Image: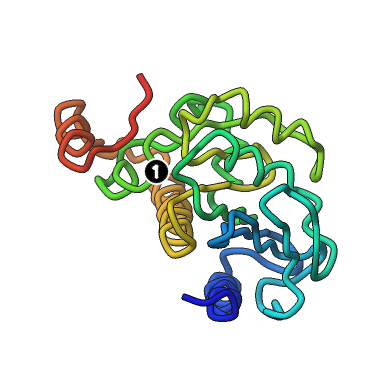
Amino acid sequence: MTENQLREHICELAKSLYDRGLTGGSSGNISVRTEDGGLLVSPTGSCFGRLDPANLSRFNAEGQHIDGHKPTKEISLHTAFYDTRSTAGAVVHLHSCHSVARSLLPDVDEDNFLPPLTPYSVMRLGKVKLLPYYRPGDPAMGDAVRGLAGKHSAVMLAAHGPVVAAKNVEAAVYAIEELEETAKLSMLLRGCDPTLMTEAQIQDVVTHFNVEWEK
């Protein structure tokens, strides 16, 4: 895929997320590693529904902003994933409704934010770490991700939204969609005593699909 094709693909996927209500207004941001080791990043204040491929922020392999509009104010959150996870080729952050709602509940496990309702959330996300509230754009969010030492591909920022890193932009989008759908399921089933996956079932998925599953 050429860089121009990648730019178009990023905007196409972002618009799909916006059109389905997974992030609204000018919320959310996305970044993708380029072949030369640089990054393409959504600009600050931009809307996922109207990203312009030509205006994406472009960074070189040394982390210098060399072209395009000013990047998202949460760029440190993205670079923290790239710096700590060698497999990261894309990072997506949304302000999706159900995951944010779940982050506000008092009885959520911060080390395993999502209940094991389906095998797909285990496969695509591993254990999602709930991080505390930070002011939007605060570099401390990146510090918190670095503090996880690359052990999580997905985190949930309390009262803010999920962030997922994956090998490419499609995988990152699919994973963050799975996170929001699982959070939605958990909210729909709240108080219903649902049947969760057993530990044996979880370990079978973890082993079969080679999932990172932090003990």
Image location (x, y in percent) of residue 178: 40, 54
Query: Which residue appears at 57% of the width and 47% of the height?
Result: 163
Residue lying farthest to the right in this orientation? 70
Q: Is residue 170 at all visible to an observer of this figure?
A: yes
Which image quarter: residue 72?
A: bottom right
- Residue named by callout 1: 125
Which image quarter: residue 141?
A: top right
Question: Tag count in the figure?
Answer: 1
Image location (x, y in percent) of residue 113: 47, 33
- The answer to whether residue 188 is above or below residue 190 is below
- The answer to whether residue 124 is above or below residue 28 is above
Query: Which residue appears at 59% of the width and 38% of the height?
Result: 103
Give the amino acid type for the residue marked by disc 1 in the picture.
Leu
Image location (x, y in percent) of residue 14: 58, 71
Neighbor class of circle 1 (other Cα within 10 Å; few <14, some 14-19, many 20+) is many
Relative placement, left or right, of 147 versus 52 is left
Query: Which residue appears at 29% of the width and 45% of the height?
Result: 123
SS class of the residue under badge 1? helix
Q: Closer to the camera, 108 or 151?
A: 151
Query: Which residue appears at 45% of the width and 59% of the height?
Result: 168
Relative placement, left or right, of 183 versus 37 is left
Relative placement, left or right, of 200 versus 185 is left
Q: Closer to the camera, 140 or 70?
A: 70
Image location (x, y in percent) of residue 67: 80, 68
